Image (tube, helix red, strand yellow):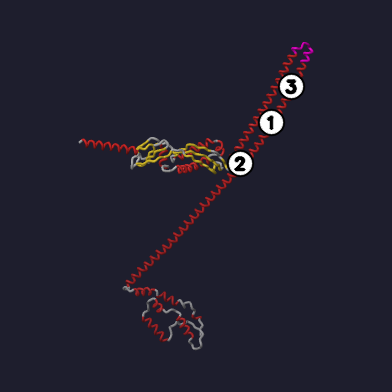
């Protein structure tokens, strides 16, 4: 009894150990940089269950698992000759960073569309999607917007590209547009124009500041001379003890003041002259550079108009070509329908004729069968009955050979033996097919009485009976 309990306890312990090992072997943990995808009989009507982190138990046989890598993928996109809203082709090299999303709905999309693909395949798929969406974004923006409003361009790329990448479970992490160039040089012309304008504005500001500084310096020097002169005058007046010295000091001060005023006027005039000259030089240079920038801008606009015109011509030519192809296909289809209708009509005609002929032959066969039955089953007698109805027509055919001959106008020459007319009539009658011979060729014969009578007439006269001419001339 004790041994049985020990065996039972040992069996239970072994069973518990086996179950524990089994659970541990099927318990899968998900690393932080991966997504655990459990597929098979997952329940809930979903194709798979995704876990970003954590762990889950994977049932044997009915379930299996794989991992999706969350490592970011860097994609270099060198977009060339993309057509903008103004029909100007631009090149936009950029670098995109994408990765498998860990959002619940996007993880399921990634499991359904990317599970089993390696990183190069995922990069190639994302590259194709990015190229198409960038062309779409550029087609809806002007060159000025692409060049000046980069934030709007990047936001549009995030919106369109990110939305398409989400359909396959990818998320757009970063977009870095390195440069934007166009084949016509329009962007470069806009940059030169802005640079020239900035340089001109800076030069004008420098000239204005130099003029203000020169004027301020001249005024300060003039104030200094005036104050010095006033101080000297007051000192000399205070020290003068006599009217002469006072008058002399006053005159000297007046002279100094006058000289100071003259120097001040000269310096002010010189400063104004320099400021005016600097302003004119700056204006001239700014005008010259503005002319250069305008000329370059006009050249760029001319190239742009030429490119736009060429693009319109290409589009028009393509449209005309498509119209011609469509017209040719329509004409070919019409001819095929016409030919088919004519063929159907001709076939219907021949079918009707064949059916009519078949019906006629069928009726004739039925009539002949009845005629053979009436003749006691003898086909030859039935054919004889049919030929009797045709004797009149056969006789008409025989007589038609000499029907139109005018016997009264026939002239016969002989050697004087009187046989000329008889020989002529005999030969003429010989040209007419014999009715009995014709019937024999058809498997029929005349009654014997008529045949024997014809032979007797032949033997008695020594010649074949002939038609007696109404009038002969010997």
Whole-angstrom CA distance, mark 3 to mark 1, is 25 Å
Identify the residue position indicated by label 2 in the image. 300
**Foreground disc of the pair 1, 2:** 1
Quarter assignment of residue 462: bottom left
Whichever of labels 3 and 1 marks the residue nearer the N terminus, that label is 3
**Foreground disc of the pair 2, 3:** 3
Q: Secondary structure at mark 1?
A: helix
| Horizontal side of residue 176 vs 301, given as left or right | left
Whole-angstrom CA distance, mark 1 to mark 2, is 32 Å
Position of residue 9 measured from the top left corner of the image (x, y, whole percent): 25, 36
Q: Report if residue 365 is visible in the image.
A: yes
- Extreme residue in the right direction: 244
Q: Which residues are magenta?
A: 237-249
Crowding at dot 1, Cα within 10 Å, few <14 / some 14-19 / many 20+, comes out as some
| Horizontal side of residue 168 vs 201, given as left or right | left
Position of residue 76 measured from the top left corner of the image (x, y, whole percent): 51, 41
Q: Where residue 63 is drawn, which disc sits there?
A: none
Q: Secondary structure at mark 2?
A: helix
Whole-angstrom CA distance, mark 2 to mark 3, is 57 Å
Label pair 2/3, CB-CB below 8 angstroms = no
Q: Where residue 278 is drawn, which disc sits there?
A: 1
- For the point 48% across and 77% down, the residue is 404
Q: Report if residue 43 is visible in the image.
A: no
Q: Where residue 261 is drawn, which disc sits there?
A: 3
Whichever of labels 1 and 2 marks the residue nearer the N terminus, that label is 1
Crowding at dot 3, Cα within 10 Å, few <14 / some 14-19 / many 20+, comes out as some
Quick check: 84 above or below 334?
A: above
């Amino acid at each position: 009894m004790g041994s049985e309990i020990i065996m039972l306890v040992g069996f239970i312990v072994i069973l518990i150990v086996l179950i524990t090992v089994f659970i541990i072997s099927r318990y899968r943990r998900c690393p932080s940089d991966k997504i655990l995808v459990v597929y098979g009989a997952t329940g809930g009507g979903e194709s798979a269950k995704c876990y970003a982190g954590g762990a889950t138990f994977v049932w044997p046989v009915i379930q299996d698992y794989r991992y999706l890598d969350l490592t970011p993928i860097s994609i270099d996109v060198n977009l060339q000759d993309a057509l903008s809203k103004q029909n100007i082709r631009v090149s936009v090299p950029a670098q995109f960073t994408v990765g498998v999303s860990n959002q619940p709905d996007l993880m399921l999309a990634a499991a359904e569309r990317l599970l089993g693909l390696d990183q190069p395949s995922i990069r190639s798929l994302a590259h194709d999607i990015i190229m198409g969406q960038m062309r779409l974004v550029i087609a809806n923006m002007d060159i000025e917007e692409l060049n000046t409003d980069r934030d709007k361009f990047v936001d549009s790329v995030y919106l369109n590209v990110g939305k398409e990448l989400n359909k396959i479970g990818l998320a757009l992490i970063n977009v870095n547009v390195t440069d934007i160039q166009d084949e016509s040089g329009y962007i470069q012309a806009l940059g030169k124009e802005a640079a020239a304008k900035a340089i001109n504005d800076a030069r004008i500001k420098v000239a204005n500041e130099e003029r203000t500084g020169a004027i301020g310096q001249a005024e300060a020097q003039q104030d200094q001379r005036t104050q010095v002169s006033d101080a000297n005058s007051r000192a000399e007046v205070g020290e003068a003890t006599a009217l002469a010295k006072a008058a002399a000091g006053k005159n000297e001060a007046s002279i100094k003041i006058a000289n100071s005023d003259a120097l001040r006027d000269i310096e002010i005039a010189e400063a104004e002259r320099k400021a005016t000259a600097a302003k004119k030089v700056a204006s001239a240079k700014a005008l010259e550079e503005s002319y250069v920038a305008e000329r370059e801008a006009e050249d760029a606009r001319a190239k742009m108009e030429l490119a736009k015109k060429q693009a319109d011509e290409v589009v028009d030519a393509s449209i005309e070509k498509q119209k011609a192809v469509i017209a040719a296909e329509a004409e070919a289809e019409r001819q095929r329908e016409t030919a088919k209708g004519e063929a159907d009509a001709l076939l219907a005609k021949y079918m009707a004729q064949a059916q009519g002929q078949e019906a006629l032959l069928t009726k004739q066969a039925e009539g002949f069968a009845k005629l053979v039955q009436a003749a006691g089953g003898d086909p030859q007698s039935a054919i004889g009955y049919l030929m009797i109805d045709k004797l009149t027509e056969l006789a008409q055919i025989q007589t038609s050979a000499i029907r139109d001959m005018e016997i009264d106008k026939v002239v016969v020459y002989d050697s004087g033996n009187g046989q000329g007319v008889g020989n002529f009539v005999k030969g003429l009658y010989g040209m007419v097919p014999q009715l009995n011979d014709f019937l024999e060729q058809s498997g029929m014969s005349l009654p014997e009485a008529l045949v024997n009578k014809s032979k007797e007439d032949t033997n008695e006269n020594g010649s074949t009976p002939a038609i007696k001419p109404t009038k002969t001339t010997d």
